[in-house]
Each structure stands twice: as C-alpha cells, then as structure tokens.
Amino acid sequence: MNKIINLYKYFSDKRFSTIAGTLVYFLLMSIAPFTLWLTLVCGNLDIERFLSHELFDAVSPILRQLKASAESAASGAGIIFLLTTLYSSTNFFYHLRRSGEIIYNSARVKGGLRLRLASLLLIFSVFLVMAVLAAVSVTGSWVLERILPFYVADIITYCVITATAFTVALILNIFACPYKLKASEALPGSLLTTALWLIFVLGFNIYTSFADPEKLYGKIAALIIFLLWCYIMMSSFVIGIIYNGMFKSKREYKKLF
C-alpha cells in the first residue's frame, strides 16, 4: 500500500500526466496510418467480436470508423502516401521510448534512426500478432457460440482480452525502457497497468451508461469520449512504467540504442 501511495505522489509531483497526454497525441497521429498498414498487410481482419464486446462499448463507434476508413484508403493508396504513412505510424513508438528516457531519468541518447527502425520492426511484429489474434478470434467465435454456454464463452472472452492487454503492456514497458529490461523486471508494472485498464474500462462503461454525453457534446460526443478513454488508458500505462522505474537505479541496467 505504501508503494501505491508513493507511486501516486511520484506521478503527481513529477507531472507525468503531461507525458500521458503527449503519448495520446502521438497515438492519435499514429493510429490511422497504423490501421491502414494493418489492412494492407493482413487484409480485412475480423475483429468484430472484440469491438462488439461490452468493454469497448464507449469507443467502438470510432474504432469501426477508423477500420472502415483504412479499408477505403488502402484500395487507392499510392507509394508516396504509403511511405509517409509508414513513417507516421512509428511516431507513437518513437516518442514512447523518448518518454521512457524521461521517466527513467536517462540522458537522451543519439540514434534516432535506429530507434525509428526499431519502431518499424515493432509495428510489423504487431501486424503478425494481430493477424494471429484475428485468426484465433474467428475460430474461437465459432467454438464459443456453438459449443459452450453463453456465460462460459463470456468468461473466456474476458480472459483472452485480459491476456492480450497484459501482453501489450509488457511489450510496451520493455520497449519504453532505455535500458535492457528483463521481462521479469517489467512484470510488476505491466500487471499494474492491466489491472488499472480493467478497472477504468469497467468504470468508464458504467459512467457512460448513466451519463448522456450527447447532451453536452452533441455530434462530437463519440470523439470526446474516445479521447478521454485514450487518456485514461495512457495514464494507466505511464503509471505502470513509473512503477517499474521508480525503485530502480539506472546503474543496474545496460544502455540500449
């Protein structure tokens, strides 16, 4: 409990919420080109079972629109457009590492090109993981809907989403650290991030079910809700990185690129 209290004070005193906001900005800049390339590389992925899940009720309209826009753009994309969008899609991962340097109190190192290439490699790794998840989702949907009872299928879906969220948090925690960070060392912060994600997503869905954002924001309500959702998720992720880094000394690590 003391560590959690210290973590909150550290998060507030250092104003790391600004980093969360910055990462949301670069996530929004990267998500559209990333979705475009995901469509080009993997085709029209069937992720409707995940989008239709209650955990994503608040943001599913925007995610569906992004998916539809990417499918439309992919059909007529030129080579120059593709190259620029590929560069843009690395922005989030590039600035994630730069944010990690701030959180871990590491001196900024040169090697921006190598960092871009590492970001590009991570993007294509995500493409592969997404393709596998989509294939598992299609097969799993058939099994869940036709063989298992509804409540069992729902539990399994929750477990798959939680495992996927934890895997994403673990990979991003390792990538954000400017030092060589073992998976076991990134485990505590990744578990904390995953727990916070689940708590906030469930709480956010309860909030939106009782509130009526359209009365306040009108036609842009879905966009405002999506931005707020992203900020909450990114703040939870930054807290996980801080938890991994605040009790460590940089002398314990070996510098990466």
Image: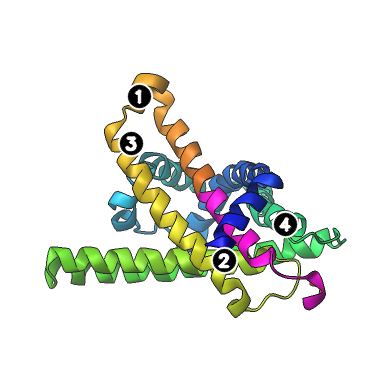
Q: Which residue is mark 4?
A: 103
The part of the image, by quadrant, that contains residue 3 is bottom right
| Residue at disc 2, secondary structure | helix
161 or 135, which is in the foreground? 161
Q: How is the image coloured?
A: rainbow
**Mark nearer the N terminus (1 vs 4):** 4
Quadrant the C terminus occupies? bottom right
Q: Which residue is mark 1?
A: 214
Q: Is residue 112 above or below residue 222?
A: below
Q: Nearer the viewer, mark 3 or mark 2?
A: 2
Magenta-highlighted residues? 233-252
| Residue at disc 3, secondary structure | helix
Question: Label 4: few (<14), some or many (≥20) within 10 Å?
Answer: many
Q: CA distance from mark 2 to mark 1?
A: 35 Å
Q: Is residue 129 left or right of residue 50?
A: right
Q: CA distance from mark 4 to mark 3?
A: 32 Å
The part of the image, by quadrant, that contains residue 66 is top left
The part of the image, by quadrant, that contains residue 179 is bottom right
Q: Is residue 184 visible?
A: yes
Q: Which residue is mark 2?
A: 189
Q: CA distance from mark 2 to mark 4?
A: 13 Å
Q: Is residue 72 left or right of residue 46?
A: right
- Give amino acid for label 3: Thr
